[in-house]
Amino acid sequence: MKPMESDALDCRALEEIQISAVIPVYNREKTIARAIESVLAQEYPPAEIIVIDDGSKDATREIVQKYGDKVRYVYQDNAGVAAARNRGVSEAKFGWIAFLDSDDYWLPHHLKHIVYAMHATEEKAVLYFSDIEHNINEKGGSYWDFCGFSISGRYEFRQDASRYALGLRRQPMMLQASVIQRQIYIEAGIPKALVTREDTFFFYRVCLFYPACAVSGIGTVMSSDDDRGGRLTVALDSKTPRYHDCTILLYKELWRYNNMMNPDQRKIIEESFVRAHLDYSRLFLKKKQFFNAMKKVLGGFKINTLVALKWIIKDLKSYVLKRL
């Protein structure tokens, strides 16, 4: 997908829209400069650039500090990506936050296109997001295409944005391609314990209860340049207990707001919460940890017995059919 061709945008008329660019980083001496350079090259520049170093032990600090007062460098002891993002938001001086991962980079028009949509919608959305060139299985391509998502026109504003979070096989939003209202990010409150899937939690929280806007075109390129062999989301996949711990925590936190959801939303979140327990039990079964597997099954039954039974029967049918 080619970047969106935009009409001339008078940035001077939009100077009231001030964005803080936040880059969390951990041991990315080989890619952090590219990320920073892509922010500095924006046709609509952010009001500030903040790099949150989450305890890097390589030359990340020295590389960032070469940019002098163009970049505000903040160091903290290693606490994980959610804590680093939260720190970046707390350090930000302006009302809108644009995240960028340290091994990805923005195309020059990224913020310009999003600011156009913000201006056109009078900043009524709390979340603006664009497409990503994604390294799915190293093949590249549009992340929106992968999600089965598209819009007509330059942007799509939704007062009820729950379709973005619940109506597709994957959420079409990613933090490194989003601009977020700072106060809403703070209110959403990403738990520090979510070392993975923190973006999924955040987009559920926002899109279930606030308006959002999709902006046409690819604005961010997700790379696979990490010399340690992969991204965090690859290292913590569904075969790891930590992934399942985070998934259960994600839905547990969301379920606290179930009285604010409509019946359809509540049903989807509840079924996903039960499913998260049963998926975890399957991991324990593969490891022959039967006591732990049973505890997770019972956890699913405690949330909703009928839903748990439905999922178990469905899994059993699938298992039998594979053996026929």
Image (tube, grey):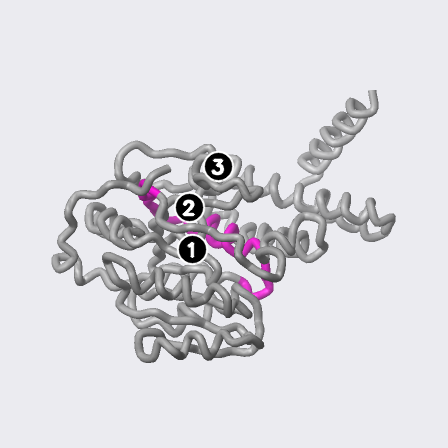
Is residue 201 within the magenta segment? yes
Counting residues from the start of the chain, the first of labels 3 and 2 encountered is 2
The answer to whether residue 230 is visible is yes
The residue to which callout 1 is attached is: 176
Q: Quadrant of the C terminus?
A: top right
- Location of residue 267 in the rendering, given as x and y in whole percent from the top left corner: 55, 37
Q: Is residue 153 left or right of residue 8?
A: right
- Location of residue 77 in the rendering, given as x and y in whole percent from the top left corner: 56, 78
Figure check: 64 above or below 219? below
Instruction: Report helix, strand or loop for mark 1.
Output: helix
- Look at 50% across and 61% down and name the residue there: 190
- Look at 30% across and 32% down and name the residue there: 152
The residue to which callout 2 is attached is: 132
The residue to which callout 3 is attached is: 147
Q: Is residue 95 left or right of residue 58?
A: left
Q: Are marks 2 and 1 in contact (CB under 8 Å)?
A: yes
Figure check: 248 above or below 74? above
